[in-house]
Image (cartoon, rainbow, N blue to C red):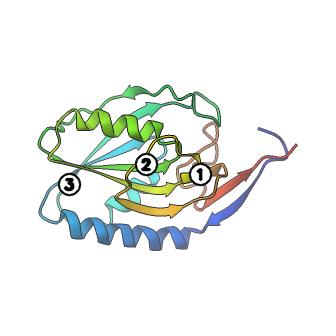
Amino acid sequence: MSAQSEVRTLYTRQEIASTINRLAYEIRRDYQNRHPLLVGILKGSFVFMADLVRMLDFPLEVEFIRLSSYHRSSQTTGNVRIVHDLSATVKDRDVLVIEDIVDTGLTTGFLMEYLQKRKPASLKLCAMTDKPARRQMPIKIDYLGFTVPNKFIVGYGLDYDEKFRNLADICVLEVGG
């Protein structure tokens, strides 16, 4: 990362909070009385998932899976691997995947296919951000926060080489010279 890198706010913490309220409303409407399993994709989704779960007022279970396709780079390798698998049973459960960003779709597509093979009662996707300009495979997003431009996004759990996750806003990382 260049010494001339800077971050520019794309969505403020207030805009994020408003969007999470909307997403929580939609999820509450669809999952009331269903006791879903929410699966967060580590590491990026943990901030979003924590804020979202606090807005859901029904019984649910939280689980995490960790996948990798970036390997300390800003570009995906396209080779997705499971670093930490689920411990909860997916079979016959209503499963809602919580994702920070859907970019190329390779990682998200891999996970959705992996979970579908475990025969959940239902499987849906909630993504804080979507970057359709980089999509390499079609992904159905059932609950979407923001559509973002084809820029490198950091903050609110999103990182660049493990940096910037702690920013309260969603920002564009501008890398100079």
Q: Residue furthest right?
A: 177
Q: Is residue 118 left or right of residue 52?
A: left
Check disc 3 and give the amino acid type: Leu
Check disc 1 and give the amino acid type: Ala
Examine the image and state in which quarter residue 64 appears.
top left
Give the structural element (helix, strand or loop) at label 3: loop
Q: Residues within 10 Å of mark 2 (few under 14, many from 20)?
A: many
5 vs 167, nearest the viewer = 5
Mark 2 → mark 3, Cα distance in angstroms: 16 Å
What residue sits right under mark 1 in the picture? 133
Measuring from the top left, give residue 130's x and y in whole percent. 51, 55
What residue sits right under mark 2 in the picture? 46
**Of pointers 2 and 3, the one earlier in the residue sequence:** 2
Mark 2 → mark 1, Cα distance in angstroms: 24 Å
**Of pointers 3 and 1, the one earlier in the residue sequence:** 3
Examine the image and state in which quarter residue 82 appears.
top left
Q: Residues within 10 Å of mark 1 (few under 14, many from 20)?
A: few
Q: Is residue 7 left or right of residue 13?
A: right
Q: Is residue 89 left or right of residue 45?
A: left
Q: Quadrant of the N terminus?
A: top right
Instruction: Please give the name of the residue rendered at 56% of the width and 31% of the height, measured from the top-left corner.
Output: 70
Give the structural element (helix, strand or loop) at label 2: helix
Mark 3 → mark 1, Cα distance in angstroms: 33 Å
32 shown above or below 131: below
- Marking on residue 40: none
- Marking on residue 60: 3
